[in-house]
Image (cartoon, rainbow, N blue to C red):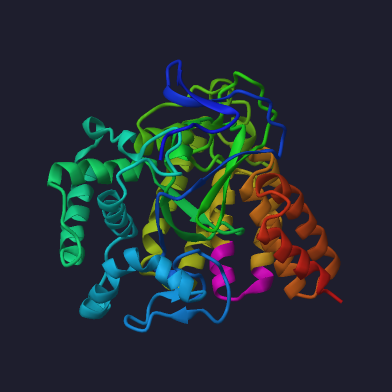
């Protein structure tokens, strides 16, 4: 197809940032700026059986693939629609059985290569940016990232050689780097991971820690909505990272994953850093050295917990959370973002263990500080109110449940749009209460 741009926006050269997207008309808070179907996507393995492999619809009674018995679909139309991509994996899953284990990135790259061989014109996902234009930053990759790329290329050859003719390794090295730097995680209304995708037009937007748009998903389509008033001539910014953390942490993440340092107003003024790093107010005020030592401990325990999730039991993980919270609580206030991070992890473990009361207790401690630390219309805040609301209803606390769900809806009406099926589901949950 011919590239005709996105109505109301234009691609331009952003000073100090390279290419970007700016508004040509006024967008009000909640306005849909544009939509972008995924160029390629893949459902995460853990969601098979609960979501359709083709359209990502969440429903009961999905029909499974008759051959591999692992992919599930709404109906025959979805199964046929997915076959050009599913055939890459169907036979291989039967052949390898439990040894079939390509990473999600490898699965996504296999689908991109397949599409590139069959679709040569620009797609509806590439109105302002073609996938081939993605930045790869090969010159900035450290040895660890280069080795990860090499491992992915080996896995791609191992699991997909039967159905794919591969480009040369130089091409694959660049493609994996492009996907790692420009790929997206598709999440549901509670920010649970559903899959991975590439949305070229969405990737054109530059980052800000005070974004004026937010990206949500309707199946495999990305929707970009304004969360601030955007005037003609203003650049359109999304956020690439979790914005909970202080400026130094955010920029460390940006440099590691995207190879730049942010100079947005929030990073320049550090206006929220003091509140995000609040220390205890009772007793002796901690010394600066004591605070820095605890920050180092917090970062280490966060990384330790991330690794431990792959092999520790839920009880062990909860113990790590509780012990770290006790230690950090000797210096940090409960509203400190490192405390909130570990509370969030503890809440997730409690939900998994079906310890509803303890999960609710953590959620209640988290939600108000989240509302302070995150920008307006944050999906993180909405998802926390949503989780709390559903917990309250499950524990027969109807009034508190409905109140929390209404707060989630107020955010989601702007971020997701009033007609999104997630909102309809939440309203039904509220109406079903006695």
Q: Residue furthest front?
A: 1
Residue at (71, 40) in percent of width and height: 30
Q: Is residue 93 above or below residue 336?
A: below
Q: Does residue 227 appear left or right of residue 106 in this picture?
A: right
Could you tell whether 146 is left or right of 345 in the image? Answer: left
User: Does the image show residue 151?
Assistant: yes
Q: Is residue 329 visible?
A: no
In the image, residue 68 above or below residue 406: below
Q: Residue at x 70, y 50 (%)?
A: 412
Which x, y percent locates residue 167?
16, 48
Q: Main structural element of the magenta stretch: helix, strand or loop?
A: helix
Residue at the far top: name it. 15
Quadrant of the image containing the C terminus: bottom right
Q: Quadrant of residue 316?
A: bottom left
Location of residue 87 with respect to 98 vertically, above or below? above
Could you say where residue 46 lies in the image, as x and y percent from the top left? 43, 70
Q: Residue at x 32, y 80 (%)?
A: 68
Q: Nearer the viewer, residue 196 or 342?
A: 196
Would residue 52 be found to the left or right of residue 257 on screen?
right
* Magenta-colored stretch includes residue 356: yes
Magenta segment: does it hold 199?
no
Q: Which residues are magenta?
A: 347-358
Q: Nearer the viewer, residue 34 or 146?
A: 34
Q: Quadrant of residue 430?
A: bottom right
Residue 258 pos. (x, y %): 37, 35
Label count reads 0
Q: Which corner quadrant holds the N terminus?
A: top left
Query: x, y percentage for residue 149?
Result: 22, 48
């Amino acid at each position: 197809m011919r590239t005709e741009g996105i109505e109301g926006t234009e691609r331009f050269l952003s000073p100090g940032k390279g290419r970007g997207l700016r508004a040509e008309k006024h967008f009000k808070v909640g306005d849909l700026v544009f939509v972008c179907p995924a160029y390629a996507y893949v459902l995460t393995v853990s969601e098979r059986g609960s979501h359709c492999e083709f359209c990502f619809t969440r429903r009961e009674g999905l029909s499974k693939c008759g051959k591999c018995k692992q992919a599930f679909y709404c109906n025959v139309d979805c199964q046929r629609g997915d076959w050009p991509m599913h055939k890459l994996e169907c036979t291989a899953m039967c052949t390898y059985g439990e040894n079939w284990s390509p990473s999600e990135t490898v699965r996504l790259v296999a689908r991109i290569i397949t599409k590139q061989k069959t679709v040569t014109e620009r797609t509806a996902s590439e109105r302002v940016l073609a996938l081939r234009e993605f930045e790869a930053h090969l010159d900035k990759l450290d040895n660890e990232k280069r080795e990860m790329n090499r491992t992915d290329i080996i896995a791609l050859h191992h699991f997909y050689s039967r159905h794919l003719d591969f480009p040369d390794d130089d091409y694959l090295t660049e493609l994996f780097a492009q996907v790692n730097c420009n790929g997206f995680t598709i999440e549901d209304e509670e920010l649970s991971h559903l899959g991975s995708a590439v949305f070229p037009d969405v990737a054109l937007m530059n980052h800000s820690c005070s974004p004026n748009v937010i990206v949500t998903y309707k199946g495999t389509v990305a929707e970009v909505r304004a969360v601030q008033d955007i005037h003609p001539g203003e650049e359109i910014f999304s956020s690439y990272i979790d914005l909970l953390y202080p400026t130094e942490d955010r920029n460390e993440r940006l440099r590691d994953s995207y190879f730049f340092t942010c100079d947005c107003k929030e990073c320049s003024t550090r206006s929220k850093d003091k509140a995000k790093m609040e220390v205890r107010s009772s007793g002796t005020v901690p010394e600066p050295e004591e605070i820095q030592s605890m920050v180092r401990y917090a970062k280490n325990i966060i990384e330790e917990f991330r690794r431990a999730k792959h092999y520790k039991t839920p009880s062990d993980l909860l113990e790590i959370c509780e012990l770290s919270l006790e230690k950090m609580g000797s210096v940090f206030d409960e509203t400190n973002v490192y405390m909130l991070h570990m509370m969030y992890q503890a809440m997730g473990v409690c939900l998994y263990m079906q310890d509803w009361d303890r999960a609710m207790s953590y959620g209640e401690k988290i939600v108000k500080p989240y509302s302070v630390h995150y920008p307006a219309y944050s999906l993180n805040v909405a998802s926390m109110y949503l989780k709390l609301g559903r917990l309250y209803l499950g524990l027969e606390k109807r009034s508190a449940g409905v109140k929390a769900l209404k707060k989630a809806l107020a955010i989601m009406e702007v971020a997701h749009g009033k007609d999104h099926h997630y909102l309809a589901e939440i309203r039904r949950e509220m109406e079903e209460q006695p």
